[in-house]
Image (tube, helix red, strand yellow):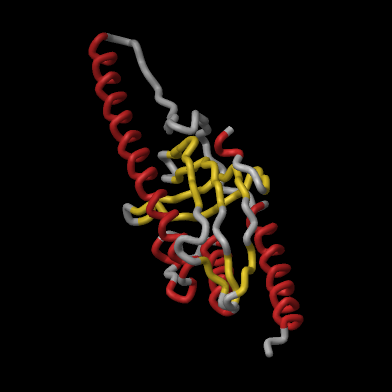
Amino acid sequence: MLDIQLIKSQQLKTFLILSCWFLVSSCSSSPTLSLDDSAGATSTTITTSTTSTTSSNSAESSNSTDSTSLEDDELDYEQSVRQQFQELVQWQDSCYQQPKSCRFDEFTIVGTKYHQALSEQISLYAKNNINSRPGRGKREVAIESITVDDDALVAQVDACLYDTVILYMDGFIFNDHVSSSQTRWTLQLDNNRWKWINFQILHREYNTNICQE
């Protein structure tokens, strides 16, 4: 017969380890962005500062052209961030389902503190046979705002996360908490790919969906 008490003891030990890791990760500071913006749950915006001159009609015409070019660049950034952020979320889901097959360098920048922290977490999941299963809960991520620092090529995505995913360990339920959180994801452009370099939980509540409020 299985030693249920031993299993529970191992589960508790692993849970305490993971809880400590999550506390450290969630409270870490993201890279400072020079831009900040917020919008409704159904829209995204990018804010940049521009300098205009009014010395002559020709200068005004030139500035108008430059402004249009900047707006096009900003739109391209916003679209690429939005698309690749959605791919990042799908990638993360697949990593939790199969932690032993997770490739951290696809969506994180090797050498960053967050890459190291995430790799340690997924490795701990793989070692202890902790994973999620398709169809057993879901994560709904609603983008609320996107801001981009053009100089640093860093993007900040504020999103509301509703999480009902069930985690299993050795076939037993490890975590079935239902939670919703206001989150902040930081990405950096690396070889034409926006990669994940930090994550913060700004506010979290259990057994409710604050994303619908």
Q: Is residue 26 above or below residue 43?
A: below
Q: Is residue 58 above or below residue 178?
A: above
Residue 192 image position (x, y, % from top left): 32, 52
View extreme (front): residue: 1
Q: Nearer the viewer, residue 106 or 150?
A: 106
Specify the quadrant that holds the N terminus.
Answer: bottom right
Residue 139 image position (x, y, % from top left): 50, 52
- How many numbered discs? 0
Q: Is residue 45 above or below residue 51?
A: below
Residue 92 image position (x, y, % from top left): 46, 60
Q: Quadrant of residue 54?
A: top left
Q: Nearer the viewer, residue 75 or 202?
A: 202
Residue in the image at 62% along x and 73% along y: 172
Specify the quadrant that holds the C terminus.
Answer: top right
Residue in the image at 44% along x and 32% along y: 42
Direction from residue 15 to residue 108 in the image, left or right: left
Residue 212 image position (x, y, % from top left): 55, 36
Direction from residue 130 to residue 42 in the image, left or right: left
Residue in the image at 51% along x and 61% along y: 136
Q: Nearer the viewer, residue 92 or 114?
A: 92
Residue in the image at 45% along x and 43% along y: 155
Direction from residue 83 to residue 133 in the image, left or right: right
